[in-house]
Amino acid sequence: MPAQLIDGVALSGLIRGDVATRAAALTAQGRKPGLAVILVGEDPASAVYVRNKVKACEACGFHSVLERYEATLDQATLLARIAALNADPAIHGILVQMPVPRHIDPHKVIEAISTAKDVDGFSVHSAGALMTGLPGLRPATPYGCMKLIESTGLSLKGKHAVVIGRSNTVGKPMALLLLQAHATVTVCHSGTPDLGAHTRHADVVVVAVGRRNTLTADMVKPGAVVIDVGMNRNDEGKLCGDVDFAGVREVAGFITPVPGGVGPMTITMLLVNTLQAAEALNA
Ligand code: NAP
């Protein structure tokens, strides 16, 4: 029997409904949640991402600001804009779309955002909070993956989870969130000699590599939960993930499609983080 699809669009709809209700309650108290998104440069993919984030904010009744700058913007001016947004009481979350142009240091940019408004969860403070199990804002993509796994009804306690990819924004925080949920976690990367030797024993596999067909059917334990974070283009130019969807679907128990899986959940968890930041401010 083919795997059950984990529908990120439907789950997003449910969560966004709750977010909109809570946002309306805050707005009624004069505390409308606000997100500022900064885009530096002309990268077309980044422009689509930020537009979708702003649109999602508006649909949930948030205040949102999109600041677009030329790729030549100097770092000092960008840091000054972040400082102004840190001080703006109408803004509860600040996101600088990555990557920034090469003359700007992304670490300086991330660290300039006030901890309370770090809705991407990329700062050293937010990463440290996750690492040590303290409350804080979690990176949206792995946070969304956790919600997708949760939606299958699987309890992670005692299960073996394999994460392929160890980026600071996806792979590493994903591994920590799984660990926090009491899974036994293996992290694989480009130096892992035999990925299948790990994934074949996994109850959950999260693939965040950025390379088509990284996970194929022969690498998957029957019934496993497979979460595909990757975003690639196939030979026809269509969006696809890191997983050989057609093959793996025949073996896995649950699988996320691309598109319609992790992508919508990333934006949804950004909204959740912004709402959480707004609620925390005056709690
Ligand atoms: P990244 O920073 O490039 O990291 C990729 C990771 O994959 C690295 O840790 C790398 O290992 C590992 N890797 C590369 N080749 C490998 C191989 N052959 N076998 C095993 N591991 C390998 O990418 P990222 O930002 O984490 O994103 C990963 C993918 O997810 C991309 O396609 C990205 O577009 C997508 N993404 C999607 C969303 C969404 O909302 N759907 C959000 C974020 C990212 P090393 O560390 O050893 O180099």
Image (cartoon, grey):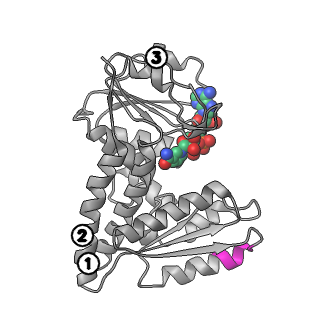
Query: Is residue 162 visible in the rendered structure shown here?
Result: yes
Q: Nearer the viewer, residue 136 or 155?
A: 155
Q: Residue at the location (43% across, 44% down)?
A: 262
**What residue sits 60% from the left and 19% below the top?**
193
Spatial CA distance of label 1 from label 3 is 47 Å
- Vertical order, 154 against 271 (above or below): above
Is the residue under label 2 in contact with that under label 1 (CB below 8 Å)?
yes
Chief SS of the magenta region: helix
* Residue 276 % position (x, y): 32, 67
Which residue bears the numbered disc 2?
Answer: 22
The residue to which callout 1 is attached is 26
Image coords of residue 21 (percent x, y):
23, 68
- 86 relative to 117, above or below: below
105 or 23: which is nearer to us? 23
Mark 3 and mark 2 residues within 8 Å of each other at the beta carbon? no
Residue 236 as seen in the image, left or right of residue 30: right
Of the two numbered discs 3 and 2 on the same chain, state the one appearing first in sequence. 2
Q: Can you identify the residue that label 3 sits on?
A: 217
Amino acid type shown at disc 2: Arg
Report the amino acid beneath label 1.
Leu
The residue range painted magenta reads: 73-78
Q: Could you tell me residue 48's position as x and y percent?
A: 57, 58
Of 235 and 132, nearer the camera is 235
231 in relation to 141, above or below: above
Q: Quadrant of residue 177?
A: top left
Give the secondary structure at mark 3.
helix
| Mark 2, other Cα within 10 Å: few <14 / some 14–19 / many ≥20 | many
Asked if ligand 1 lies within 8 A of label 1, the reply is no
Q: Is residue 190 visible?
A: no
- Number of other residues with Cα within 10 Å of mark 1, as a class: few under 14, some 14 to 19, many 20 or more: some
